[in-house]
Amino acid sequence: MSKTTGFNLEAKYAVAMWDFSWLVRRAGKEAEYADWDQVLDELAERGYNCVRIDAFPHFVAKGPDGNLVERFTVLPQGSSFMWGNHQPVQVEPRPALVEFIGKAAERGIYVGLSSWYNHDTLGRVHMIQSPKDYARIWLETLDLLNEAGLHDRIVWVDICNEFPVSRWAPGAYADIFQSKRLGDLWMMRNMYKRWDDRVKQRMKNYFDGAITPLREKYPDLKYTFSFAPLGSRQMQQIDASAFDVAEVHIWVSDYMKWMLVTGQFLTHIGFPRYPKNVKIHARRMDKLYPKHREEYIRMLEGRIDFWAAWGRKNNLPLFTTEAWGPINYDDVTRDGTGGEWDWVKDIAEQGVRMASERGWKGICTSNFCQPHFEGMWADVGWHKRMTELILKG
């Protein structure tokens, strides 16, 4: 039984979001995380005291046949997705998870656990079809970390990233919306339309059914499902009394008109248009941001206040680990040194400040504070200023 955890209601957490990249970008042309000692030293140097990572619970846990699999081949991400591997990679998640969290602990860095439920050659994501399935795989994952004496490093457990987006939760999404169509357009239609009581109840069933068994065995840990902007008004209508914390993702990109006018929407279109479209977006923002900066800040403030009110209503400590300006972005010049990150850092600074003023417990500087976004990662001074602001509250 876990006796202590990393969560401290009085503490502040400057959070870096390293998703599944921490494990799958360690070889070949995508080897930024090959040396965990080096990148964790860099994370600590920048002032971060928490990192949100994919715990790969569907790989850590036993399969449907009751057997453990030690090694998995993770399938590639799409070309327009800037995180994770873009070639098949082999991983051994059980020892890796223990080793990585242990190394983080040596540097005073805590973890927020989540999962994006990546696809692999065994199709393990398809064994998650119910709240009971989420509970089982996370129990086995938490058992592993408890046996390793690492529960005191866990700040919170996010059962599923951006639930119930079909990309990350195909089984739950199909069940909740009673739909076999998992494509993005159908998903957006379902997420934005008004939900009837049956949809709301099925959603609540996942919250309660997944978290209750975890809390029964490990009551000192903190549990949640993170939310994306998609369907945010509908998500706020669901009974979230099972949550201990709220993990909400907030961008100026939440506004569809902004997405279209600025070219951010184009960055979600894959190869061969993907690299070109990021450049188009960066060039547009070079002109639009100075002209409309105050308007963009007001838009972001509206989204932050929207979630702050919901957090107060539900008495939930707020965490945001993906946020502020663009959802998709990347270096567009050599080593990202051509100024393309200037506006991203400026709007992020406004988001950090506003969330801090409103009492957020955990705040990211952006969803690009990772070694493989070279231009963003290289500005050590900026990271230090942001993490100092977060930690001072």
Image (tube, grey):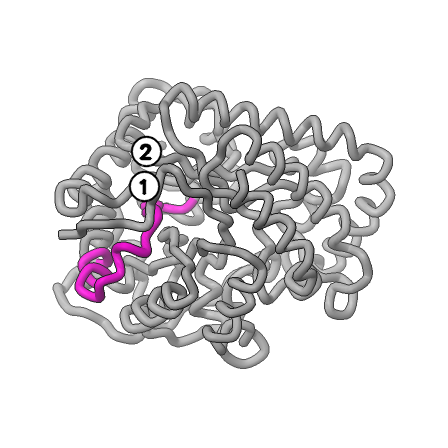
In the image, residue 366 above or below residue 244: below
Q: Position of residue 352 (x, y in %)?
A: 60, 40
Q: Is residue 325 magenta?
A: no
Question: Which residue is depicted at the point 71% across and 47% down?
Answer: 344
- The answer to whether 33 appears left or right of 125 in the picture is right
- Separation (CA) of disc 1 from disc 2: 6 Å
Residue identifier under label 1: 172
Q: Is residue 154 magenta?
A: yes
Which portion, as a residue range, is magenta?
A: 141-161
For numbered disc 1, what is the local secondary structure? helix
Q: For the residue marked with disc 2, what is the amino acid? A: Ile
In the image, residue 135 above or below residue 51: above
Residue placed most toward the observer, 106 or 210: 106
Q: Position of residue 241 (x, y in %)?
A: 28, 26
**Could you tell me if residue 268 is visible in this image?**
no
**Could you tell me if residue 308 is visible in this image?**
yes
Question: Which residue is depicted at the point 42% across and 27% down?
Answer: 235
Q: Position of residue 57 (x, y in %)?
A: 29, 58
Residue most extreme to the bottom: 28
Residue identifier under label 2: 176
Q: Are marks 1 and 2 in contact (CB under 8 Å)?
A: yes
Question: Which residue is depicted at the point 62% across and 48% down?
Answer: 386
- The answer to whether 284 appears left or right of 196 in the picture is right
